[in-house]
Image (tube, rainbow, N blue to C red):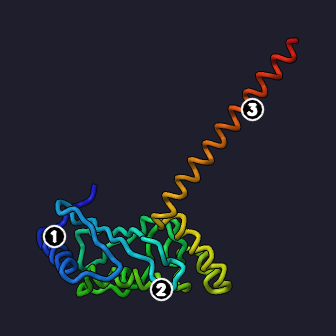
Amino acid sequence: MAKSLSLGIVKRIAFELKKLESDSIEGIVVKYDPQNISIVYAYIQGPVSTPYEGGTFKVKLNFTPDYPSVPPVGYFVTKIFHPNVSKDGQICVNTLKKDWKPELDIRHILLVIRCLLIDPNAESALNEEAGKLLLEKYEEFAKHAKLWTEIYASIENKASNIENIRSLNDCQNTLEAATSKKESKRSSLKRL
């Protein structure tokens, strides 16, 4: 069972969130439940001229009772092909690890995560496949990252994918019905 945050930590997080509301970051929208600010969500638009362009990525920050001495744990909720993001979404960035300082805030964390989309770091890869491709075959890396962005982070493509799945299901149902009809005719002919 998770410990609840102290009043001092709640006030600090609330202050940081208020600051973000009045001085927002372009391309990032922050959402949270005022009744539980230990979890903050950010929707980050994929930066232009990157394989993530056109996507919107949902990121989750989990704050613990040790904040601000310890950074929040950051996760990509939206699937992403990125060297610094594990398959379960955990983010590996020095700001959330060894370079953390209690003076840093949510704004700084979100800016660093957005910068990761612009400039991935293959040397601290959690996703070895993405890290290797980034270093050795950038075009292949970009193609893969762009495909994942289109599949998982693009609202327009999500609607299109749903329609494609529905069309595929309709085709399968039609094929199954036709096959069933054909088998029924075969059975009738065998009886004659």
Question: Which quarter of the rendered picture does the C terminus lie within?
Answer: top right
Task: Give the amino acid type for the residue marked by disc 2 in the picture.
Answer: Ile
Crowd class of label 1 (few under 14; some 14 to 19; many from 20; radius 10 Å) = some
Task: Residue type at mark 1: give it.
Answer: Val
In the image, what residue occupies the spot 72% across and 28% down?
Answer: 180
Could you say where residue 81 lies in the image, as x and y percent from the top left?
Answer: 55, 72
Pointer 1: what residue?
10
Residue 45 percent across, percent down from the top left: 41, 76
Vertical relation: 184 (above or below) 31: above
* Secondary element at tag 1: helix
Question: Tag 2, which secondary structure?
Answer: helix
Residue 88 visible? The answer is no
- 1 vs 3, front mark: 3
Q: Is residue 177 above or below residue 39?
A: above
User: Are the two marked residues, 2 and 1, in contact with CB atoms closer than 8 angstroms?
Assistant: no
Neighbourhood count class around disc 2 (C-alpha, 10 Å): few under 14, some 14–19, many 20 upward: some
- Front residue of 52 and 186: 186
What residue does disc 3 label? 179
User: Does label 1 or label 3 sit earlier along the sequence?
Assistant: 1
- Label 3 sits on what residue type? Thr
First reached walking from the N terminus: tag 3 or tag 2: 2
Q: Which residue is mark 2?
A: 118
Whether residue 87 is visible here, answered yes or no, is yes
Image coords of residue 99 (percent x, y): 36, 87
Q: Earlier in the sequence, mark 2 or mark 1?
A: 1
Q: Nearer the viewer, mark 2 or mark 1?
A: 2
